[in-house]
Image (cartoon, helix red, strand yellow):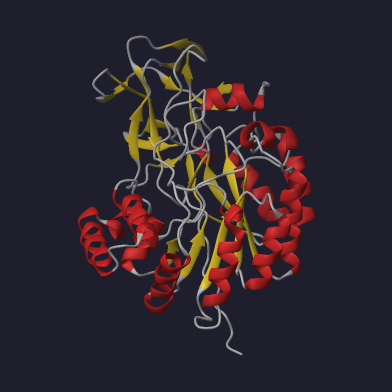
Amino acid sequence: MILAADSTGKIFEMPGFMPLVQTGTEIREPESDEIMPIPEEAYFYFLPERFPWVSKNKKISAAEKVFPVSVILPQGYTRTLLPAYGPEDKQPWLPYFGYTAALLKNKKIYVGAVPTQPNLEWAPQNFLPQKVKKLIQKKTAEDPENKTLQQLALCAEEYHCYTAANIFFERWEGALPVSPSCNSFCRGCISKTIDPGPPSPQERFTFIPSEDECLNIMQNHFAKAAEPIISFGQGCEGEPSLQGNLIETLILKTRKKFPQGQFNINTNGSRPKIMEKLFKAGMDSIRVSLNSAQEKWYNAYYRPTNYTFADVCETIQRAKNHGIFVSLNLLCFPGVTDSNQEIVSFFNFLDQVKPDMIQLRNLNIDPWCYLKECIQEKITGIGIPKWISQIKKEFPQIAIGSFTPYIKKTPH
C-alpha cells in the first residue's frame, strides 16, 4: 500500500493504491528481495512540489494533492529502490539526501534497501549530541588555539559527522581535514554549492592547517583510541592529496612512534605520483571514490580538473603494488549501478584494479537531476540485490561493506 504525506508532512496510507518504485528511469512495482522492514535509525522525508506515481487496477496515474514519501537510510544499508514521483523537470533541485522508496506491507513500513554492514559502532546512540558537546568542551579547552580542532568541533556538533566526533570520543576512525581546495566539481558536492543545484548542506573549511595542530590531534588519537584510524579526506574538505606534502610530513613524524595507528585517505585518486609518496611514507589504507567505471558517467558527475579516469586507475594500481588496503567508495544509484552496461564496465574494472573492498554508499542527490545531468539516457537495472550477488559470485575475494576496517598489524 502506498504511503503519502500532506503539506504539513503528516504521513498516511492510501487504501486501494499499489505502491510504485523507480530504478533508473523505469517505474514499476517492487520485488520482494528489494525491500526490508524500515531500520530503526531511518527517518522520513516528503518531497515538496512533487506527486507520487501510484497504481490502481494495473493503471499508473498521479496521486494529486499529496506528496511522495521517502526515507533516508542510516549508515550500513544500501538503497535498492527510489521513490516514484513526478514531475521530472521544472522543479528546484531537492537537497542532497539518499532518497529511498517507502511503502506499507502487512501494516508495517518497508523500505527499498538491503543491509550491507550494519555496525553498532556507528549507531546514533553512540553519538548522542549531549555527550558530544561535553567532550568538545573538554578537548577544546585543553587546546584552545587549535583551529583544526575547532573545525572538527563544528563538524561533530553542527554537521553530525561521526568521524569528527570520534576525535573527541578518542576512539576508532577519526577525521583530520587538511585540504580546503579540490580538483573536481562533483554534482553532489556536500561542502561547496555547485550551480545548478541546492545549497551545500555544510560549508567547506577555509584554511590549510598547521603541522603542529595536526600532530597534536593525530598523536593524541593514536595514544588514546581503541583501534585508532586517522582519516584524511572528509566531507568538510576538498581533495586531500592536494596537501600531499603536509600529509607525508605528518605520517613520517608519527609512524615510528605509533606503529599500530592506521593512516587512511579518502580520495578521488587523481594524483598517482603524490599518492606514491604517501604510500612510501606509511599510508595504510586508501578509499577511492567513484560513481561509475564508465568514463563518460564518471566525468559527468565528478567533472575532473587536470586529471583523468586513467589516473584513478593508476593510483589504485600503485596502492596495490605497495600492499596498501584498497577500498572503492562506490556511490550507488538504483538502475544505474546495476544496469547491464555498467556491470560490464565495473566488472572489467574490478578485474583490472583488484580492490580489497567495495564500500557501498547511497548517492545523495536529486534522483531526476542525476539522471538528466549525468546519465542522459533511458536506463534500468537488474536489481541491486542481484547485482550484489553477482559481485560476490564473480569476485569472492572482495569484501563488501560500508566502513573502513581497522587493519591489525603483526609486530616485528
Q: Is residue 339 visible?
A: yes
Q: Residue at x 57, y 69 (%)?
A: 249
Does the rendering let one see residue 324? no
Of residue 375 and residue 243, the one placed in the foreground of this image is: 243
Q: Nearer the viewer, residue 333 or 203?
A: 203
Q: Relative to 76, is 351 on the left or the right?
A: right
Relative placement, left or right, of 162 versus 298 is left
Please state the horizontal and vertical placement of residue 362, each as a whole percent of the image.
51, 41
Please tell me whether residue 142 is drawn above or below residue 43 in the rendered image.
below
In the picture shown, does residue 168 fall above or below 289?
below
The N terminus sits in image quarter: top left
- Residue 80 x, y percent position in the rendering: 53, 38
Number of marks drawn: 0
Q: Residue 138 or 6: which is nearer the viewer? A: 138
Q: Position of residue 401 (x, y in %)?
A: 54, 56
Q: Is residue 261 left or right of residue 295?
A: left
Nearest to the observer: residue 381 or residue 1: 381
Quadrant into which the C terminus falls: bottom right
Above or below: residue 191 compared with residue 94: below
Residue pictured at 31% horizontal, 66% vertical: 169
Say if 322 sits above or below 91 in the image. Answer: below
Q: Is residue 162 left or right of residue 309?
A: left
Q: Horizontal and vertical percent for residue 298?
A: 68, 37
Name of the residue lying farthest toward the bottom: 412
Name which residue lies at 39% across and 37% down: 201
